[in-house]
């Protein structure tokens, strides 16, 4: 077996998942994204902002495919219930760099409804960057509920739950090198 880490089925915590996107396809899509971004940001010294935890693996691979001089700083999104009518509030933790007049690329694992990304962009724009674009490894177009300009998308996928390549199921499965989809019989 030339791919010793390529499993057809995996158990993550207490559910079974089947192979959905293998690491060779992921690698080629990440390389394409990296090449496009490198071309678009020639001479702009972009600042990449990957969103933890989910994007750690994609961010590492993407940055290895960036050939322009750049900076990287990680953030984390904390969600908490606000009082009464406000509902869920997202706060960005760890934003240490001065964003003013910078060319920002937010790096995410997956955009689902787009609510998280909308909040992240709102928090970043407060600092008046020169530009902000999104690079997401995966996008579920059928789940999208916000208007977002998604310039760099690795792959569009169906509206089904996936794990691996940084994405978790209840904290588990982030270490998997490929992406796995929840087995049909467990979709309920
Ligand atoms: P959104 O705010 O766009 O609905 O959700 C974004 C977040 O939901 C992602 O950053 C990710 O943490 C989580 N998410 C959405 N879809 C999936 C999925 O299929 N699998 C996993 N593991 N997480 C997902
Ligand atoms: Mg994420
Ligand atoms: Mg998660």
Image: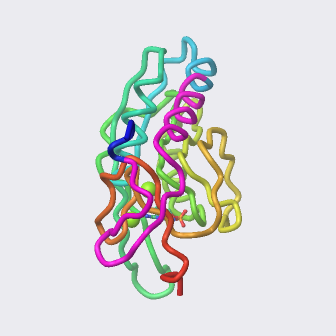
Residue 110 coordinates in the image, percent (x, y): 52, 55
Left or right of 74 in this view: 20 = right
Compared with 33, 125 (above or below) is below
Compared with 3, 165 (above or below) is below
Name the residue rendered at 30%, 52% in the picture.
175
**Where does the magenta region start and end?**
6-35
Q: Quadrant of the N terminus?
A: top left
Residue 43 coordinates in the image, percent (x, y): 54, 11
Residue 124 coordinates in the image, percent (x, y): 48, 46
Residue 157 coordinates in the image, percent (x, y): 63, 57
Name the residue rendered at 60%, 66% in the picture.
113
Of 70 and 176, which appears nearest the observer? 176
Q: Is residue 159 magenta?
A: no
| Quadrant of ligand 2 in image | bottom left
Name the residue rendered at 47%, 22% in the picture.
66
**Residue sitting farthest toward the front:** 1
Compared with 62, 21 (above or below) is below
Of 10 and 84, which appears nearest the observer? 10
Of 158 and 128, which appears nearest the observer? 158
């Amino acid at each position: 077996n030339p791919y010793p880490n390529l499993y057809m089925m995996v158990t993550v915590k207490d559910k079974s998942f089947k192979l959905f996107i293998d690491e060779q396809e992921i690698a080629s899509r990440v390389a394409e994204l990296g090449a496009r971004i490198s071309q678009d940001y020639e001479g702009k010294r972009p600042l990449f902002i990957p969103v933890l935890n989910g994007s750690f693996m994609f961010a590492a691979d993407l940055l290895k495919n960036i050939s322009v001089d750049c900076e990287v700083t990680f953030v984390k999104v904390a969600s908490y219930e606000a009082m009464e009518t406000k509902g869920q509030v997202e706060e960005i933790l760890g934003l240490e760099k001065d964003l003013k007049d910078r060319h920002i690329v937010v790096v995410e694992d997956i955009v689902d409804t787009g609510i998280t990304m909308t909040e992240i962009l709102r928090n970043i724009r407060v600092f008046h960057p020169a530009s902000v674009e999104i690079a997401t490894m995966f996008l579920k177009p059928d789940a999208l509920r916000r208007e977002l300009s998604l310039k760099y998308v690795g792959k569009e996928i169906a509206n089904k739950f996936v794990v691996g390549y940084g994405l978790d199921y209840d904290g588990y499965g982030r270490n998997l090198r490929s992406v796995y989809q929840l087995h049909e019989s467990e979709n309920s």
